[in-house]
Amino acid sequence: MADSTSTETDVGGVLTRLDEHEYSAYIKAVLGFGLLAALPYLIEIEMAGLSLGSVLTLKILIVTLVFAFSSQAWNLISGFTGYFSFGHAAFFGIGAYATQKLAIDFGINPWFGMLVGGGVAVLLALLIGFLNFRYELKGHYFALATFAFAMLMGVVVRNTKELGGAIGYYRPFPRDYGAEYGLAAFQFQSDLPYYYVIFGFLVIVTAVAYALKESQLGLYLFAIRENEDAAASVGIPTFRYKMLAISLSAFFTAWAGAFWSMYFEIIRPETVFGLSKNVEVLLPAVVGGLGTIPGAIIGALFVFPLAEFFRANVDQIIGLDDVVYGVALVLIALVLPNGLISIRKRIREWRD
């Protein structure tokens, strides 16, 4: 017990000294992303006959990073400005369908399709943003309006024969659009390269989110979140900055959809535009710490492996794993209302 307390104190001391360092954020980022980069190899290491690989697979890690990435993108509008979007599946689905449509029907490289999908998502975001911000929809009204857009997109795609209808699209093989396997074709024959592609996406969106948060623009966005009327009264053009935030958020969320369409064999309207996708996009940032940079990543690393753990080990009754998983998330929200990122502060409060 004494050794455990001593170790905990030492770790706390190291973390406290790190927080006080001038380059604390950069050191933490390097350490955190370094750990993520090594994770596919770390899960294979056995210690005392046990390994993370017994509960974590590379496929679970890839899905985890997809939603860490999309949640970081969602954070740019919902975490930074306080406008809680419940319809980011619309942008996710646009990225997925644009990439597949261009690759299958026109033989266009998926990387270009991903950028096109991002551009289309920005146009839709400008429309959604204009209608919502122009008529000053806030709070749950904004959430419901964005959710309705996502559902509408799903219905439109489901009833559009040119987009595969309810059957959806199958992932093309490289030979179908004139490319070989590899990074240029966005197609790989094993899961490991996919992991490092989505890892690279996550580094990019996290760097953008950090730069935005540390800039004057970020200051304006957080001012909107804290008190939009007060922000407007001091001359901040709130409409313009909200439009910029939702456009940037939509652009990167479409990237997640594009990756999804190139990793899984098939996409369907209900899998990329559905309710569950909306929840999966926002959940990591909410659980990890809304409006924080590491929150979406920490939340994703907790939420999705935990769901898989319950799915694999709580199978006595059909649906029981979802109930246990839901109860666990509720308990986390009650104990850590500011997210997992606040756990150190919470522990210090309990000690005092």
Image (cartoon, rainbow, N blue to C red):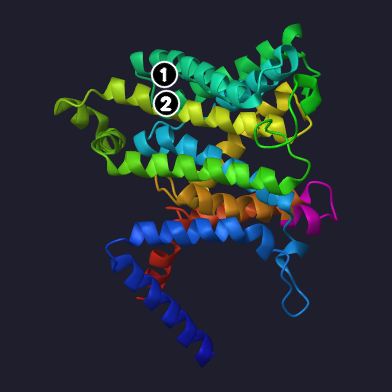
Q: Which residue does the numbered mark 1 point to in the structure image? A: 129
Image spot of residue 169 (x, y percent): 77, 21
Percent position of residue 239, x then y: 30, 20
Compared to 18, does 177 lie above or below?
above
Residue type of the residue flagged with mark 1: Gly
**Left or right: 3, with 192 as reference point:** left
Q: Which mark is residue 222?
A: none
Q: Nearer the viewer, residue 205 or 352?
A: 205
Asked which secondary structure carries label 1, the reply is helix
Q: Position of residue 261 (x, y in %)?
A: 69, 29
Disc 1 crowd, CA 10 A, few/some/many (<14, 14-19, 20+) = many
Question: From what the image shows, is residue 249 above or below residue 75?
Answer: above
**Mark 2, secondary structure of its residue:** helix
Of the pair 327 and 31, the residue shown nearer to us: 31
Whether the magenta-drawn stretch holds residue 319 is answered as: yes
Q: Is residue 17 above or below residue 95?
A: below
| Residue 172 visible in the snapshot | no
> Residue 326: percent from the left, percent from the top?
65, 49
- In the displayed structure, does residue 263 sit left or right of residue 251? right
- The quadrant of the picture occupied by the N terminus is bottom right
Kindly identify the residue that appears in the image at 54 percent across and 56 percent down. Answer: 332
* Residue 246: assigned label: 2
Q: Is residue 188 left or right of residue 247?
A: right
Give the image quarter of residue 29.
bottom left
Quarter placement of the C terminus: bottom left
Residue that sits furthest to the left in the current view: 234
- Say whether marks 1 and 2 touch (CB < 8 Å): yes
Which is more N-terminal, label 2 or label 1? 1
From where the camera sits, is residue 138 visible?
yes
Point out the stretch of residues depicted in magenta: 309-320
Q: Residues within 10 Å of mark 2 (few under 14, many from 20)?
A: many
